[in-house]
Every structure is written in C-alpha cells, then in structure tokens.
Image (cartoon, rainbow, N blue to C red):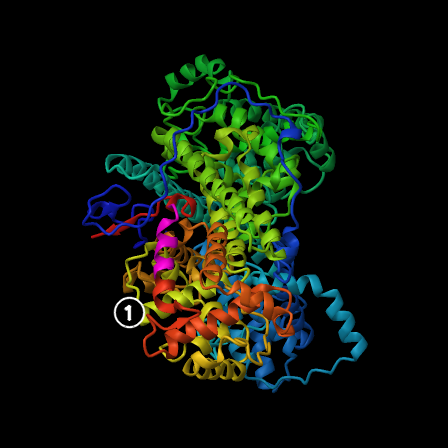
Amino acid sequence: MPQGKKNKGGRGRNNKKKKGAGHGKNSRQRPGAARTPARTLPSGDLPLRPEHALEGSAPNYQAFMQGEKTLHENYPTIYSRYKAATKRVFKYMQDNTPESLHGNRMTVNSLMAAADWMEENNFTVDPAILKDLKLSIRVRSRVARAIFGGGDSGHKHLLTVLVYCWGVMVSLQRAATKPKGIEQEAQENLSLADEDVTASRNRFEALNDEDMDDEETDETHFPSKRVPRPETEPEPMSLEELIESDDRYDITLFLLSMNELMGAVSQQFGAVGRQVVLNAQEDVPGTAIVEGLIEAATGTNMAIQQMQRLEMDFESQHPHLSTPYRVLSTFVLPEVIEEITKTVRTHGQKRCSEKEVSIFLGDCLECSFRSRSDPENKSEVIVQEFCNQYQISNEGTKDIENVFLGLANLFIMEIPVGQEVDMNTWMVKEFKSHDPNFGSHRWIPQYMNFIGGDRAIHHTLRLLQSFGTVVKNTRNDEQVLARKGFFGTSPWESGRSSKIHNDLDELLMADILPQWFLLCRNGILGKAHLPRQNEISPLWVCMKNFFDNPTRPVSWSCLFAVHAILTAVLETDKVESTITLCSQAAFEAFFWQLDKAADVKKTEVDAVESPSYKTNMALAKFLKNFGLPVFGDRAVWNPLCGGTLFSYIALFGNLEAGCCLIDDRAQLRMVLHLYHSLIVNDILERGKIPLLDILFDTFKNSRGIWEGPLPKKGQFVERFWVSFGSNRPHAADMAKKSREILQTLASSNQKNPFGNYRSDRRKLSPIEPSELATSFRRICNRDFHDVVDTYHTPEQRQHSRGSDHYTFAIQMNDTLDRIDEEQQLYSLNLPALGVYLEQFICSLSRIFQWDPILVSAQAQHAALGQDKRQGVAYMFAQYLLGALDFGTDPLNMRFFDVPQGLVSSEFMSIFFNKIDISQVIWFQAIQEED
C-alpha cells in the first residue's frame, strides 16, 4: 500500500477501551447478544457425502435480484477491445496520411508525423478514432502508472506520443456521424446487449470504451490543446515491438504488488488474533470478534478483486505469460531459457524466439506442478512436440530432454510435499556443503515475505493444481477421500504452525479443499444461485471457478484467494479454536433468532404472512446451509471463510433481505413515527427504551420511512400518510380531517370514525440498505464517489494519487471504517425484528380497541380492502398520531376512553423493554471510547 495507510483491524486501538456487556456501569454500552455456551469441536472423520450437503430446496434468489445487473468478468474482451483500438489508431493514421511519412511501417515517430500532417492540412477527423485513441491512452496510462511503474522507455515514449496526438487531433474538425437506420440500430443494440451489461457495471470501468467526458478534463492525459512535441527516437519501435517489454522486470513488479496485497491480508488477520486475546482479557463476549472478522474478510475480498485487476492488466501487457508457470519459469530460470534458445539455434531448422522458449519452459514446469495422473499433464510428449515443431536434431532433442529431467528434479527440491521432504534430506545436506544458503522455497525472493520463503505461494500453487486432478476424477455422487496424514500430522491442530508451506499442507488438502469441493458442487454454492457474490464474496467466486474448471491452470487470483485463507490461519493460529467456537455461536444465534421469530409470528392471531415475508424469510434462512455439520469447522470457520460468510449474512441475508422483512406490512414506519411523535411531545425520553433508540438512529435517514426530514409537531399525520403511500395533496387532506375530527371528537367520531375515507395510495417507497449503511453502498454498489482520503499526508497524496494502489488503499480503509461505525446495525437481526414490530402493532390495535371498529367498518368502506392493516393505519394516523399532532393535551386525550399518549407510551415502553436482547442481536457490537 502507499505510505500512510491506516492499520486496519487494530486502527490504533491500543489507547482505547472496548466497551461491551459486563463492563463498568459508567461506560456507554451497546445492548449485547446473550453469551452462547461453547460448543465442543467435533472429532473424527466427517461424513462427506453429497446427500448431506444441502437441506431443503433453494429459493429463487434470481427473482429477488430482478432488475439488478450482474458484474461480468469479461477480461479477454476488455483486453481485445484495447488491443484492437490501438491497432485501429495506427492503421487510421497510416491509411489517411502520405506514404512518405511512414514508408508502410508505422512506428511511434510516424504517429507524430501523421498527426502534424493532419493539423497542417486541416484534416477532418473521424470521431470514432478519437474514441479508440482515448481507450488506448486510458489503458496505457493505467497500466504504466498503476502496475508497472511507468514501464520501460519505449512504453513511456508511446504514451507521451499518444497524448501528443490527442492534443493535436482533438482540436481538428470532426466528421459528421451518419444517422443509422432503424433496423441497423436495432440490430446493433441487440448484438451489443451483453457487452452493454458488462460496460455499465463492470468493476473495471476504467478499461471500458464508453465516452467518459470527465476524463477529458484530465489535462495530463487528455489535453484540451496541443502539447509540446516529444523528441523522436533514433530507433523507433513498431506496434508489435511495443506490446513486448522486459518480462522479468514487469514480473518483479507484479509479484511485489501481490506481496503487498497479501501483506494487507496478513495485517488484517493479525489484528483479529490480537483482538481475540484482548477481548478475553477484558471479559468481552466472544461474539464481539464477528465485527473484526467481517472487516478483515472485507479487506481481503477487496484485495482479491484488486488481484483480479492486477492479473488482467499483467496479461494485457504480456499475453504469452498467461499462466503462473510461464511467469515463474521466466522469472526464475532465465539461464535455462537462454540455454534452450542456444540449443534451438544450433540444432534446429526453424527460428525460435526467446519468448517462445519461455512459453515452452513454463509449460514444462506446469507438468511438474500437475499430478502424474492428470490427463492434462503433457510430460510424456511436451519435449518431442517442441523439437518436432522447430525441427531440432536428435542431439539437440537429447539436450532438451536432459533439461526437462533436470527441471523436474529441481522442482522436487524447491517445492517438496509430504514424504518428499524426508527423501530430500540427504540431497539438501550435500548441496548445503557447497552452498550454505541452499534450501527449498527460494524461487520467490525472501524480501517478498508474504508470498515467498516460509509463506511461499508457489507451494500453495502445487497443492491447488494437484487437487484439481482429484476433483476431475470424482463423480458428482462421490465423496473426496482425503489421504489423512500424507501431507503432515493428522489431524491438523492449531497452535503449532510457524509457516505456510508444509505446516498447513494437511489442513488444506485433508480438510479445507475436500469440504469446499463438496460445498461448491453439492452444497449451497453449487445448487443455489446466490446473488452479489462478485461484490461481497469474490473468494467464493474464485473457489467455485476452480472446482468447475479443475484441469485448467490455476489463475493468479484463485491462487491468491486460497493463499489468503492460509495466511489468515497462520496469523490467528494461537486463537483459532476460540475464533471457531465464537463464530459458530454467532452463526447459530442468527438462525435461532429467525426460527424464534417465526414461532412468535405463528402465535400472533392478527399477523398476516405476506408474500414478501414468506419469500424473503426463506432467502435468509436458506443460508443456514453453510453451517451443515458435513462441512466441518476447518472449511467454513477458518478466519477468512468464516468472515466472508458473516459478511454475506450481514449484507445480503440481514440488511438487504431484512429491509424487505422489517417493514413488509409498514410496521417499522408506524413504530418509528409513533416513537418520534412521543419524543417530540416529551412523553417519552431518549435512553429509556434502548432498542427503540437503536432502531430510530439506524433508520432516521431512511427516505422510505420519512420521505424527507424528520417531521415536526403539526406534521406527524401528513408525513405519515406520505410515507404510507399517499400523494401529498391527499396526505394534507387527511391531516386536515384528523384535526377536524379531534376538535369535534365527542359528537362525531364514534358513529363513523372512518367518515368518507378514500384510499389514494401509491406504492410505498422501499427501505434501501444503501441508505442505512454506507458500507453496503461501498461493497454492493461499488459507490465510492464521496470517499475522502484522510489516510495520507498531502505529500503522499501528491505522490500516489491516481494509481491503483492509492485508490485501493483509500477505498478499503474507508469501507472498513464504515463497517466499524455501522456494526450496531450489522448486529441487529432485521428479519427477526420485523416480526416483533408486527406483533407490537397488532397488540396496539387490540389495546386501543380498534379491532371491533375495523370489523364493522370493513364492510362499509371498500377503500379499506380485505387487509385490516389499511384500517389499522387509518386509526393509527387519524386518532393516535392526530392526538399527538393536534391535541391540546396529547398525553391524556381520549378516544374510546383510552388516553392516547399515556397508553401508547406506557405500552411501547413495556413491550420493547421486555424483548430479550438475545432474540434480536446476533453478535456483540462493541463501542470504543477514547
């Protein structure tokens, strides 16, 4: 990360005191979840059978997300569009300028000459080519500044020339675009439909080629007028030559970037481990660690997304280095590449470039990473096919075969697994006698300490690629039988690991991967189309893609995700069992609360199970399938996987589905409007009903609840009707009638309390989770427009602004800060709360004796419909809120001999203070005080 990055997870908390249940009475405490008895960790082998991997039928998640566009990952399309755009720019300049300027070979110097000629001759420019030029500059500048430090001199010069061409051509007259015929336009729209979806919501929008007018205000890359002409190069490079650059230099920067991201993962979960210890010392409930896990997992999943960007950008620069094996061979074995190149030149009949040799050597290395039984392993034929292709003599073929065998032996020495470690002992001693620094896991330099050395990521790559063979050979109705003890001591136990390679092999191969395979093929991730995985849980997307395509070379982003799991385990190794038990307690509490609320709803005689309730409660409750015993603790409840699951439950199962459930019959609107009216009238005081204080603070900015700022006295009735779906003229009319009724209450109301009521309702404005939680907007909507960088000094901002790492750092830190601020909302079980709010409204109707009135009135007033809630809302607004709005004595004003303010306030206080907090808060939210 750029300097100045905030220490997430810890965030300077050493000088702050954690406040939670059980602390001193002078501290400001948030209501806490009940302590859940510790669960004993299961022992023995788990029944990893497909039939145990799912309970119930998957609900229709796609219907819930109807209208939401999916974020597509169309990396090759993005790259091909960029590459094609650059080629079109070169070709356009060549075709529209005299041949004497370029001699049929367009170079970088030729581009400048062509642009100058166009300016001198007042050339009319095709607007489409400016669009291509913009895309070329945008991608070239992004790759240069964000990933590869500016690239080599040739690439820097190309970018400078492209910017110069833009400054010249943007001032030229543009050709008029021809209007398209209706049929042609319709056909083009049809053919581009899928691409438009990608373009409108793709996470890599900086690489899309739509018009982005704001970019033209960037004078650095899109100057509004001509800029100084760059110096010409003595030996200008062609387009094809520019696409190739110093591979090893760029690989180094790529690996450094990856190491930096993995360092952020390590930092996050290191803070989680320390927080577990601190919570135990201060007697904070164990479930308080859920917030830390959510933060760490969110930061890690954002790092996975950043890794996907890195991988895409790297491949756009180096399409021939499309696998980790080709990258490693080019980075680690340049001497071997040079040796094979010399052999081909000496003994081959056809010319072979060094790039083609590096591809061959990378594919040879891939053979070593794959299991011998892997059908994609080409070790038996790869050398002969290469030698046949370049017509290499028998002597040269033998030399290359020896190189291949030597590479296989070197591989075993570098990345030994299982029994290979002991088998290599005598060879290691022999080599050390000649080179004291000799050892395994040295391919990635030690200074890349989060992906090299004791945390060597290429060791994880070997395990992951070999497990793909197991997946390929396992039928859908079969289970994976792990070879217990093959990769280390079995069963794996926490508290004794000091490095990732070898120490965590047994955990990964015998526990995590077999159980995740079951989860992704036969479990909820395989059978249900869960929404928002790209946004909330790219970890799941990577795992699912790996198990769906087990024979493909492992991608860098998938490798990063799995290595992040192991990094999180290593950082929390000493407290892993505590994290597991506390995570299980919080998970079980959430779904126990849903079941408890469902039972309460069944006992409420006046409750109506709306279609919204039935559908959305099923969406939330089905997520319980993640916690089935068949998956075991190591796969689901390791820190990263558990934190990712909590993130998904909190953001989708609780916030998004919960916003539909907590107000499915307008119960939340009614409760909050009543509470606010009682507070304004000084009948209730803040702090006397903690649960309602939390609810009010959570939803005070919700447009769906208030339809504007909080209402003042004299506005209660009108604003409630607006929030309930009436248009403003009708709402004002209802408020006027309420005032009139209350003024003549004794003579008119009991005969016909509904008067000439007519319904004039529109659809209620939904409660949007993005209004409640900025973190939801950050993660699910990818909305960072209002992020302010408070994490860097002005000098650091000046140095880093505009780079991918800078943007990633401030977006991640801001998102994690928002989660920290909003953890109380996260801890509220919104679906369960919706049931208790509904119970309150039903009970309120009975206490105020509205039921007999409603029964007789429904037959007379068609506007009330068959749903009694419309009538309850009328009585609630016109009489109860009316008394609080217009009554001279709102506390004691009576209707049917019931003092409206007095009874409503007392019942509200009794009802909500009686709710057991453990029924609506599923983990302990912690408040920090300086």
746 lies above or below 307: below
Relative to 569, is 20 on the left or the right? Answer: left
Q: Is residue 911 magenta?
A: yes
Residue range of the region highlighted in magenta in the rendering:
906-916
Relative to 340, is 219 on the left or the right? Answer: left
Relative to 49, is 580 on the left or the right? Answer: left
231 lies above or below 325: below
Quadrant of residue 289 in the image? top left
Quadrant of residue 89 in the image? bottom right
* Residue 272 appears anywhere in the view: yes
Helix, strand or loop at label 1? It is loop
* Residue 340 appears anywhere in the view: no
Q: Percent position (x, y) of residue 426?
A: 44, 12
Tell me the residue at 65%/53% (across/down): 62
Which residue, given by chain and number where applicable, does mark 1 sit on?
682
In this view of the protein, which residue sits in the foreground, 555 or 138? 555
Tell me the residue at 34%/73% (across/down): 890
Amino acid type of disc 1? Asp
Q: Does the magenta stretch include residue 634?
A: no
313 lies above or below 696: above
Q: Percent position (x, y) of residue 593?
A: 47, 43
The total of numbered circles placed on residues is: 1
Q: How would you rate the neighbour count of disc 1 (Cα within 10 Å): few for under 14, some for 14-19, many for 20 or more?
A: few
In this view of the protein, which residue sits in the foreground, 728 or 854? 854
Q: Percent position (x, y) of residue 802?
A: 42, 63
In this view of the protein, which residue sits in the foreground, 582 or 504? 582
Q: Percent position (x, y) of residue 510?
A: 53, 24
Determine the main secondary structure of the stretch shown in magenta. helix
